[in-house]
Image (spheres, rainbow, N blue to C red):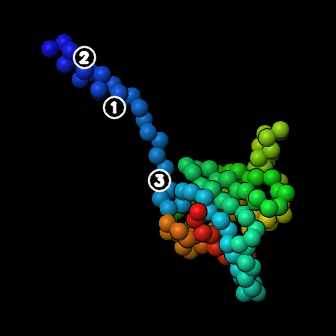
Amino acid sequence: MKKIIYLVVAVCMLTTACDIERSDNGDLDGLWQLRAADTLATGGTADLHASQTWWAFQGKIVHMHDSVAAHPDVVGHFVCTTSTLTLLDLCFSVREQGDVRVEDADALNAMGLHSLNEDMRLLTLNASTMVVETSRLRLHFKKR
């Protein structure tokens, strides 16, 4: 009888002691490649397949990487609703110096951004495609 009580107590402790951290980001979580950018003012489209610009979302962290250009990676926080995606507190990820806050929005242009705290309309988000719109651009992503 003591063995059964110990076993029940042990199982209860194991199942309540661990807290699994989950993300409620749905289809947003994962690695996204920037495939195209439409300029809203002119209607022009830039094919960015070869650019190798990637955005990754996990938890509340966004990580942006351009594997072709010599730009440092950018990390920050994000807030996503059903209709908006906002990027906040963007920093360059410089291993030797730590995270250095981005102070010039022009440094983010290679990532498809034009402001330090970018508010975007979320036009499409599903398991394979994301389309967001800034004040200047419509960015098309494909999930890897």
Q: Which mark is residue 6?
A: 2
Residue 15, numbered circle: 1
Q: In this view, does 45 lie to the left or right of 132?
A: right
Q: Which residue is drawn at 73% across and 78% down?
A: 47
Q: Which amino acid does label 3 sit on?
A: Asp
For label 3, the residue is 24
Compared across the picture, whether 28 is left or right of 54 comes to: left
Say whether residue 121 is visible: no
Across and down, in percent, residue 13 comes to: 33, 25
- Residue 70 vs residue 90, the one in the foreground: 70
Note whether residue 109 is visible.
Answer: yes
Quarter where residue 33 is shown: bottom right
Pointer 3 or 2: first along the chain? 2
**What residue is at 67 percent from the left and 72 percent from the top?**
35
Q: Do the residues labelled 1 and 2 touch (CB within 8 Å)?
A: no
How far from the left and from the top, in percent, is residue 30?
56, 57
